[in-house]
Amino acid sequence: MKTSLEEMLAFVSVVDSGSISAAAEQLEQTASGVSRALSRLEEKLGVTLLRRTTRRLELTEEGEVFLAQARRILASVEEAEEQMTLRRQAPAGRLRINTASPFMLHAIVPLIGEFRALYPQIELELHSDDRIIDLLERRTDLAIRIGHLPDSSLHARPLCHSYRRVLASPKYLRRQGTPARTEDLSGHSLIGFTEPDSLNEWPLRHALGERWRITPSLRASSGDTVLALALAGEGVVCLSDFMTDTARASGALVEVLAEQRVEVRQPINAVYYRNTALASRITCFLDFLSERLGCPR
């Protein structure tokens, strides 16, 4: 680039202040230095930007065109510098996070040690709630929600996604046998949820479609209770991957009817109010989660 930022700044400052001497004072430079910067700029561009008279300075047509571009360039540079300054400043303060208990326990809690080591000046408050809350009423900075979001005044940032799988313990399968078809589940002990009822629709292909509505022989209100019952060999369950990664990796739970499973993504989003100016402590937590949970920024 032929033109320097110093020359652009001198030109814009002269226009805004109305004179070379006023611009020099504003920039804490000499008037002769500002005048030389303007002359270099015009020479490089091969045009006259300002008509100089004894009383005032007047923009030429070329000067008006260049002024608009110069303002945009300087504003972009200033914004970039501000972003770098914010990154150098250590985020601090209280950060209130709300999410459902299973996601808190299985996805968030294992990452907290690393986050605190990276940002020791952030004071975390972790709130678990299996119901949708009002962020303002509960003084929550951000909530993490699982599933499709309704249109609302909330801004959503995708963090990751999860699948639901049908699982059982090896102990249960040795005792009751392994179902070969979705329809075989009718002869098994099925563990479901008291609410929401949509969780009792399992993503399995069968003769009539791709959702199998179960009639639970045992229900629980908590996903962790359902998980504990499955681990104890009490029946077949359908749970999100983020809850069962460890159990599946160790072999404590195994997937059944894998060939019949319909891969339906469960979106996981961080939400906050659209008119919220995100503090650095919130932004760094969102960036941290996005990186650790596998979603791009």
Image (cartoon, rainbow, N blue to C red):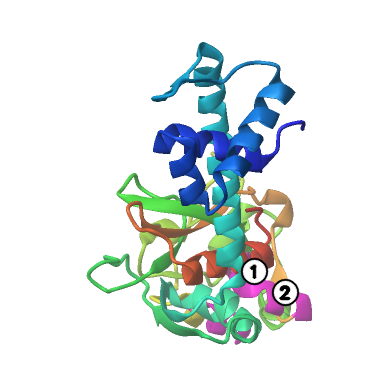
Q: Residues within 10 Å of mark 2 (few under 14, many from 20)?
A: some
Q: Percent from the top left, x then y, of residue 275?
A: 32, 53
Task: Please name whichever residue, 260 or 293, is drawn nearer the observer in this view of the structure.
Answer: 293
Q: Which residue lies under the disc numbered 1? A: 167
Secondary structure beneath dot 2 equals helix
Tag 1–tag 2 contact (CB < 8 Å)? yes
Say left or right for 45 vs 112.
right
Residue 177 seen? no
Residue in the picture at 48% in, 68% down: 282
Q: Percent from the top left, x then y, of residue 45?
A: 70, 21
Give the number of the disc on residue 110: none
Above or below, 186 relative to 174? above
Q: Residue furthest left?
A: 137
Q: Residue furthest top?
A: 61
Q: Which residue lies under the disc numbered 2? A: 248
Q: Percent from the top left, x then y, of residue 29?
A: 57, 51
Q: Main secondary structure of the magenta part?
A: helix
Residue 249 lies in the magenta-colored region: yes
Q: Give the image quarter of residue 242.
A: bottom right
Q: Residue furthest front?
A: 54
Q: CA distance from mark 1 to mark 2?
A: 9 Å
Q: Give the image quarter of residue 106.
A: bottom right
Residue in the picture at 66% in, 52% down: 261
Task: Please name whichever residue, 59 or 131, is drawn nearer the observer in this view of the structure.
Answer: 59
- What's the amino acid at mark 2? Arg
Secondary structure beneath dot 1 equals strand
Above or below, 107 relative to 150? below
Region of the chain picked out in magenta, as a range: 226-251
- Figure label count: 2
Q: Percent from the top left, x then y, of residue 225?
A: 48, 82
Residue 46 seen? yes
